Amino acid sequence: MEIIEECNKRLEELYKFSNEILFLGESILDSRIEDLEKEIGYKLPEDFKYIIKKHNRIILAGTQVYGLSQELKGSSLDMIYKFEHFEAENPMPKFFFPFSPDGQGNHYCLDLSKITDEICHVVFWQWDIEYEDIEDVEVCNDSFIDWIDEVMIDWNLEVYNHDGSEK
């Protein structure tokens, strides 16, 4: 229950932003997430699943969390996963789940190899680095909701007010 409470707190913070800079996708009401888990062979962390089911795609002032839908084509979580693991020049380990781009070809990823208590770290995968040891990949946040706090909310509040005006 604690995870859901934390997720709802983060969502309430996101809801404070104006629709001028915030896009929230529709809810996922079918089994897409569970089907994706079966397809990739990993369970996704509870905080990620809860939030993505509430809002299938989130964009705040250019910072994006991908959604899961055929309508999104190449920007759908399943298609991004396939590309980054099977088609990219420097493929990710299968247990990294890319969920947000930085605009330079790099991704914030869930490290699905280290789920503990239904939560996992967020790492930053740089496409142009050939990692000798996977432990060299930068751990950014302890969880997806911590990532939302820092990257989506805090970093945007450094530049924008909740109404979308620049500071």
Image (cartoon, rainbow, N blue to C red):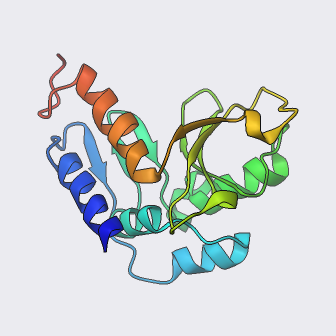
Residue 108 appears at what percent x and percent y?
A: 57, 41
Q: Residue furthest bottom?
A: 30
> Residue at horizontal 15%, vertical 24%?
165
Q: Quadrant of the C terminus?
A: top left
Give the side of residue 107 with respect to residue 58, left or right.
right
Q: Quadrant of residue 41?
A: bottom right
Residue 107 appears at what percent x and percent y?
A: 61, 39
Residue 68 appears at what percent x and percent y?
A: 51, 64
In the picture shown, does residue 128 fall above or below 114?
above
Give the side of residue 140 with respect to residue 64, left or right.
right
Q: Quadrant of the N terminus?
A: bottom left
In the picture shown, does residue 29 fall above or below 101?
below
Q: Quadrant of residue 125?
A: top right
> Residue at horizontal 83%, vertical 48%?
87
> Residue at horizontal 42%, vertical 63%?
47
In the picture shown, does residue 96 fall above or below 33?
above
Residue 72 appears at what percent x and percent y?
A: 52, 57
Give the side of residue 86 with respect to residue 100, left or right.
right
Q: Residue furthest top?
A: 167
